[in-house]
């Protein structure tokens, strides 16, 4: 797969996720709008019943018109915006009407917390993987990260794995999916990576670069050379498919820990 083809795979994946977000967001907006509509109908019916039952009371006043106007406005605006979000997701999946989707997304951005925006603009820790030695490494939700490595992870041959300069191994979820599309039976953790990242521009992941994964600071130290333990995950045993010297840009990377801490799946990944 050429670099252009690889980028096309990544673009398709990001576009699919964006379209899915718009579908889900639109459905949630419509659900809230229906709630306001149902609340308005319920309160109107309640006031009507009470008014009829106590029509003789001079103290009973019906609900002000502004009360119903407010909920009616929320219902109409929410319904309209929910429909627009669903349409935006559809247009994204069809790769058309980009300006429409951009304008629909603008109001939503105003309500997104700053931390979530940072996550969208950077990347996400998709999976934390550890093992008692060997592959595949199995996922866990959270782990402490020390200068010696990831909590719960162990390496069998310390000549080639582990140590302060190889404390954490990282790989890209998008590259894993691209390799799977080529026919390799690979999945998260199969290549022995501790952190599976998504949404990270892998061309910027080079030795010497620094990044933050949640509260943990890392410095990339070297490309990880593949070993024969990976044979089972590659068609015809061609595990050199992820060797930096053979296929630049497809390798895993090692990192040293600059700042210890605890990471959780879903943590933001930030590059300077």
Image (cartoon, grey):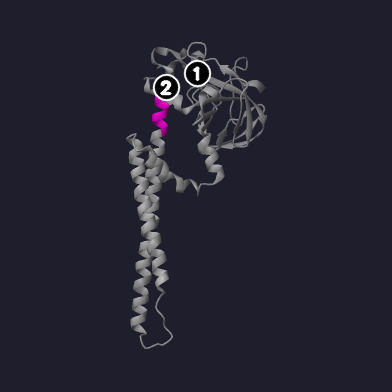
Residue 80 in the image, given as x and y percentages of width and height: 35, 53
Comparing 182 with 209, the one in front is 209
Find residue 115 and report its horizontal and vertical position in percent: 56, 43
Q: Position of residue 218 (x, y in %)?
A: 63, 28
Q: Nearer the viewer, residue 260 or 50?
A: 50
Label 1 close to label 2 by CB (< 8 Å) = yes
Q: For residue 206, which numbered disc appears in the image?
A: none
In the drawing, does residue 14 fall left or right of residue 123? left
Q: Can residue 266 be seen at all in this image of the molecule?
A: no
Residues packed near mark 2 inside 10 Å, few (<14), some (14 to 19) or many (20 plus):
some
Determine which quarter of the picture holds residue 77.
bottom left
Residues 103 and 3: in front is 103
Rendered position, 70 above or below 197: below
Quarter placement of the N terminus: top left
Q: Main secondary structure of the magenta part?
A: helix
Please give the range of residues in magenta.
8-14
Q: Residue furthest front?
A: 99
What's the CA distance linking mark 1 and mark 2?
10 Å
Q: Secondary structure at mark 1?
A: loop
Residue 187 part of the magenta-drawn span: no
Disc 1: CA contacts within 10 A as few (<14), some (14-19) or many (>=20) = some
- x and y percent of residue 265 in the render? 53, 37
Residue 235 horizontal side relative to residue 159, left or right: left
User: Which numbered marker is on residue 249?
Assistant: 1
Which label's residue is closer to the chain start, 1 or 2? 2
Residue bearing the label numbered 2: 6
- Residue at coordinates 66% horizontally, 33% vertically from top-left? 260
Q: On the rendered structure, is 175 left or right of 213?
A: left
Residue at 34 percent across and 78 percent down: it is 49
Can you say which quadrant of the picture contains the C terminus?
top right
Mark 2 element type: helix
């Amino acid at each position: 797969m050429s670099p252009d083809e690889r980028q096309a795979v990544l673009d398709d994946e990001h576009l699919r996720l964006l379209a899915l977000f718009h579908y889900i967001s639109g459905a949630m907006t419509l659900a809230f709008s229906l709630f306001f509509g149902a609340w308005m109908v319920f309160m109107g019916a309640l006031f009507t019943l009470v008014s009829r039952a106590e029509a003789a009371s001079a103290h009973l006043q019906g609900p002000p018109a502004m009360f119903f106007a407010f909920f009616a406005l929320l219902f109409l605006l929410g319904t309209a915006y929910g429909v627009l979000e669903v349409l935006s997701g559809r247009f994204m999946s069809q790769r058309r009407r980009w300006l429409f989707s951009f304008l629909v997304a603008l109001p939503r951005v105003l309500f997104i917390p700053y931390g979530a925006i940072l996550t969208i603009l950077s990347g996400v820790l998709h999976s934390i993987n550890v093992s008692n030695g060997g592959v595949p490494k199995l996922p866990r939700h959270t782990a402490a990260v020390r200068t010696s490595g990831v909590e719960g992870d162990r390496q069998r041959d310390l000549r080639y794995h582990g140590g302060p300069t190889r404390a954490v191994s990282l790989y890209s979820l998008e590259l894993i999916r691209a390799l799977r599309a080529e026919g390799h039976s690979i999945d998260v953790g199969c290549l022995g990576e501790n952190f599976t990242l998504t949404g990270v521009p892998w061309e910027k992941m080079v030795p010497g670069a620094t990044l933050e994964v949640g509260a943990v600071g890392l410095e990339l130290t070297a490309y990880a050379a593949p070993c024969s333990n990976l044979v089972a995950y590659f068609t015809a045993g061609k595990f050199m498919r992820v060797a930096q010297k053979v296929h630049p840009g497809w390798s895993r990377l090692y990192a040293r820990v600059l700042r210890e801490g605890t990471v959780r799946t879903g943590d933001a990944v930030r590059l300077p």
